[in-house]
Image: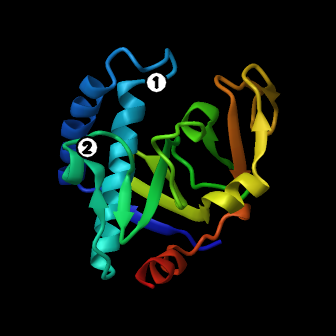
Amino acid sequence: MKLLIIKVPEDIRKEAEERSQKLAELHKGRWTKFDSPDDNYSGEIGRIVIQRYFKENGLNPISDDELHGKSDKFDIKIKEKLVEVKTQIIKDYEPQLHWRCEINKKQKDREDRKFDFVVFIKLNLVKNLAYVVGFISYDKFMEKAKFHPKGEIMDDNKKSWAVKEDKYDVRIDELNNSIVDLIDILKH
C-alpha cells in the first residue's frame, strides 16, 4: 500500500489551534465526555491538510467556516459535493492495512451534516505527518461498515479495548487508497 504522506508544517498547526478554539465555543454544552479539544485540534489539522492538497491539485475547496462563519455543517465542499475528513491521532508507527477507520453513530445520524465522500487520515503529531490512508463514498462506507456498539470488546490490536461510543468502521484495505482518484471524481 502506497499512502499519501503529507508533512504538517507549523502554520497548519497554528491555524488548527485557532479553528479548534472557535469550534469549542460553538459546541459548548453539546460535546459528550468523549469529545475533547485534542480531537477537535487533530480534526482541524486533517481538514486543513486536505483543503491545501486539493488546492494544490486544481480544486477549489470551500470550508463551512468560509460560508457560514463556522456553523459546522460540513468539512469541505467542492462544487456540490461534500467531503468529510476524519482524523485520528496515532502513535509513532505507520498505518497498517488492518487498522480501522470509523464514523461514530452520533456523527452518522446528524441530519444537518450529510456528505458524499469521507477521507480518512492517521495523524502522527510527534513526526508532524498526516497519512492519508484513503477515501470512500458515504454509500459504500455504509454498505461495507461494521457496526460496533458502545462497550463491545475489540481485540484486533495489541491489547483488548472497549468501544467508547456506538460506531461504524471499515478497514484501511477496504478504502480507495489513492486520493488522486477522489480528485478526478471531484473535478467532474
Q: Is mark 1 on a helix, strand or loop?
A: loop
Residue at point 75%, 35% (across, down): 158
**Residue 128 seen in the current view:** no
Q: Is residue 29 above or below residue 77?
A: above
**How packed is label 1: few (under 14 Cα within 10 Å), some, or many (20 or more)?**
few
Please name whichever residue, 27 or 57, is drawn nearer the observer in this view of the structure: 27
Which amino acid does the dot numbered 2 rest on? Ala
Q: Is mark 2 on a helix, strand or loop?
A: helix
Where is residue 101 drawn, in percent x and y? 63, 48
52 sits left or right of 131 in the view = left
Residue at point 56%, 75% (across, down): 178
Name the disc covering residue 16, or none: 2
Residue at point 46%, 24% (across, down): 35
Q: Which residue position holds label 1? A: 35
Where is residue 155 drawn, in percent x and y? 82, 33
Q: Is residue 123 above or below residue 18?
A: below
Where is residue 105 drawn, in percent x and y? 63, 34
